[in-house]
């Protein structure tokens, strides 16, 4: 089994994964209440919260599983906030020393890319290796507050990034848009909620890079367009039309994501499509991508809501599915060396 720790940003998370049965348990502490009054994540406060909450979460995990059969510790070692990652790595090394097992560093974005497969594994663990082969190569759309990219998971489980954002991530654009609209933090869910009562065609916001053969994303122009639009409107009009503004702004973000995903599907021979990352919880995005996948006659694998944000379940799963993680001998107290990046490492599923 694999004991996994995640602390890349503002969630402290622990999970235990058994390849024979799936996730045996997940425990998470969210720091939303700490950061929402600041309008965003404060790294020093986030690191302090990780330091406070890892021990209680690990105690719950041990009480539930006994850590019997744990053969390795998996921990996020990038990308993320440096101070937060350091707390997770230090905790993982301490647990490795206590349990006398090795440590595996996991790339956070690799874990997001593989997270839509967690449900498939849970349905039939004994058939997963064969099932996975039928779903590769796989086009992965990862959409979060810090990253927006399209990646290909090849048949040998190597991941190649084929596009990314040239400026802001989609989640960041939603958060900053919500701040301009006076909605608070985190912005994505608040914009989605307000947009339900608005018209998505009320305002014509830009969709980023327009050329179909250009797969990169861009959201800075959208954000600037919203700011200029709001500056021209009286406060009373902004209040009256906030729902329309949110619906139109959200639609522009989703249209940009779908346009580039559709173009990527046209350029490659993919067996399936995946959606992961925090913004993957957006219902309209899920619906639109499901429609696109159905039209392309490819199955959509969308990460479960509990595995879209920062969570340890996906870290444990990635550590199992990717057998090329970098290990260290805990009895020598060596620092964890960087695991292979999202565009570099390959692996194979243990039969």
Image (cartoon, grey):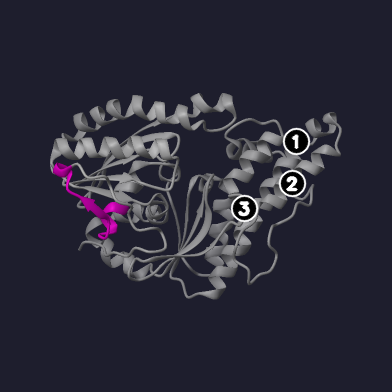
Q: Which residue is mark 3?
A: 167
Q: Of the residues under marks 1 and 2, which one precedes in the sequence?
A: 2
254 lies left or right of 243: left
Looking at the rendered structure, the secondary structure element under dot 2 is helix
Between the C-alphas of marks 1 and 3, the distance is: 26 Å
- Residue 52: horizontal and vertical position, in percent? 35, 24
Q: Of the residues under marks 1 and 3, which one precedes in the sequence?
A: 3
| Residue positioned 35% across, 70% down in the render | 134
Region in magenta: 318-332
Q: Which mark is residue 242?
A: 1
| Residue positioned 14% across, 42% down in the render | 331
Is residue 55 magenta-colored?
no
Q: Which residue is mark 2?
A: 224
Looking at the rendered structure, the secondary structure element under dot 1 is helix
Between the C-alphas of marks 1 and 2, the distance is: 17 Å
93 lies left or right of 309: left
Q: Residues within 10 Å of mark 3 (few under 14, many from 20)?
A: some
310 lies left or right of 205: left
């Amino acid at each position: 089994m694999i004991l996994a720790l995640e602390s890349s940003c503002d969630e402290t998370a622990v999970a235990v994964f058994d390849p024979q049965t799936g996730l045996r348990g997940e425990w998470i502490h969210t720091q939303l209440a700490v950061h929402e009054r600041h309008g965003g994540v404060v790294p020093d406060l986030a690191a302090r919260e990780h330091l406070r909450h890892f021990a209680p979460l690990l105690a719950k995990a041990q009480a539930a599983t006994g850590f019997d059969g744990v053969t390795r510790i998996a921990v996020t070692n990038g990308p993320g906030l440096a101070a937060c990652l350091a707390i997770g790595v230090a905790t993982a090394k301490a647990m490795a020393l206590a349990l006398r097992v090795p440590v595996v560093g996991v790339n956070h974005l690799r874990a997001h890319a593989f997270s839509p497969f967690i449900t498939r594994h849970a349905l039939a663990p004994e058939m997963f290796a064969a099932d996975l082969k039928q779903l590769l190569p796989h086009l992965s759309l990862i959409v979060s507050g810090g990253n927006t990219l399209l990646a290909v998971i090849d048949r040998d489980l190597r991941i190649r990034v084929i596009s990314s954002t040239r400026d802001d991530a989609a989640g960041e654009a939603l958060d900053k848009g919500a701040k301009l609209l006076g909605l608070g933090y985190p912005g994505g869910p608040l914009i989605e909620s307000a947009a339900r009562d608005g018209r998505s065609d009320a305002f014509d916001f830009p969709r980023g890079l327009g050329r179909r053969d250009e797969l990169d994303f861009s959201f800075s122009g959208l954000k600037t367009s919203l700011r200029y639009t709001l500056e021209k409107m009286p406060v009373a009009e902004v209040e009256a039309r906030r729902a329309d503004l949110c619906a139109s702004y959200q639609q522009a973000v989703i249209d940009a994501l779908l346009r580039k995903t559709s173009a990527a599907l046209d350029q490659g021979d993919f067996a399936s499509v995946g959606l992961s990352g925090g913004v993957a919880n957006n219902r309209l995005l899920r619906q639109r991508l499901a429609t696109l996948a159905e039209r392309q006659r490819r199955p959509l694998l969308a990460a479960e809501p509990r595995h879209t944000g920062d969570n340890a379940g996906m870290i444990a799963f990635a550590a199992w599915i990717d057998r090329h993680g970098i290990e260290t001998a805990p009895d020598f107290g060596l620092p964890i060396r960087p695991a292979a990046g999202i565009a570099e490492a390959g692996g194979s599923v243990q039969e």
